[in-house]
Amino acid sequence: MRLLVTGGSGFLGGFVLDEAARRRHEVVALARSEEAALVVAARGAKPLTGDLDDSTALTIAFAEAEAEALVNLASLGFGHAPSIVAATKAAGLDRAVFVSTTAVTTSLPARGQRVRLDAEQQVQESGLFWTILRPTMIYGAAGDRNLSRLLRVLTRARVLPVPGGGKHLQQPVHVADLAGAVLSAVERPVAEGRSYDVAGPEPIRFACLLRTAARAVGSQTRFVPVPLAPAVAAARCYESCSARPRIRAEQLQRLAEDKAFAIDEAVRDLGYAPRSFDDGIRSEAAELGLPVAGENGCQAGEAGRAAHAPRTRPARRR
């Protein structure tokens, strides 16, 4: 199948392009710069000049791609959905897969939440044969913005504060597993007109996630619970003083939310079979060149309690 991919030069994009090549798809990837063009070309895709901020040029580029399906990995949080949908339809493409995020379900007044929800609605009302995938926190390689930084910190930190004590649930998804789900969604007609939450195999408590990551690199870091409110206040001060803050108050506030999602429909329709967090975090440590310890995981009973906790916000049919 000939695929048109947006966001192919990004973190997830690299894994999707690699998986598309493995499955023998022909890929045309939108690139807004020479640097992005080189990145996607190195992954086996044909670069196509285009810019999501220029709707006229975007329509021309989509038509030139002569693709059979769109795979939109570009963020839906910047208001580009109307232009992307219009260009897709003008190019005669009727099949499209869009990657959103489970972050749209937060109860916090998160930045971009309304934009993403509106984008999902625009896709659903577009008349396309659409599929929407909502991944949880993505990890698995350098550049994941989350756990790669944590692993490096754990190799040198003796003490690490844990805002809120780490009692709430997380369900991170390995980037390679997500890339496989994206391609399966394109390939399987059963996925048309459906939305899927894409997460790890089971939710685990954040404290367990931290200990599993620490044991993956043989870290002896001591985790110290701290109250959430002062940590959030400190993060807000840090944000106001930093041009490019490495952590935001909203990220800490979200630690007080359970992020647990049912993946049954993705398993059934997409053949989705995500790896355990234990396996995924050890493979990431190895890729980062960090010392990798033996198999680990949560203490007896902890993973079980997390796994059998209510799975909120199940995958829904649109």
Image: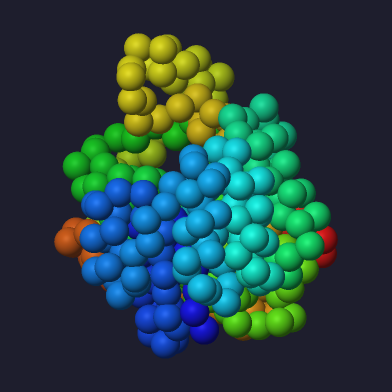
> Which of the 4 image quarters holds residue 254?
top right
Vertical placement of residue 281 versus 221, above or below: below
**How many numbered tags mark residues here?**
0
Look at the image and tell me whether residue 270 can be seen: yes
Residue at left offset 72%, top offset 42%: 118
Q: Is residue 36 left or right of residue 107?
A: left
Q: Where's residue 179, x and y in %?
A: 48, 70
- Give whichever of 7, 207 is nearer the camera: 7
Tell me which corner region of the image, top left, top right, bottom left or bottom right, holds residue 134: bottom right
Identity of the residue drawn at 34% across and 64% down: 47
Residue at the outermost bottom position: 24
- The x, y position of residue 222, in whole percent, is 33, 40
Is 294 above or below relative to 204? Answer: below
Q: Is residue 214 left or right of residue 179?
A: left
Q: Residue at x 42, y 70 (%)?
A: 28
The image position of residue 207, as x and y in percent, is 49, 46
To which quarter of the image does residue 243 belong? Answer: top left
Residue 16 position, x and y percent, is 43, 69
Colour scheme:
rainbow
**Quarter holding the C terminus?**
bottom right
The residue that appears at 24% across and 38% down in the rendered structure is: 157
Q: Is residue 114 left or right of residue 177?
A: right
Residue 299 visible in this rendered orientation of the protein = no
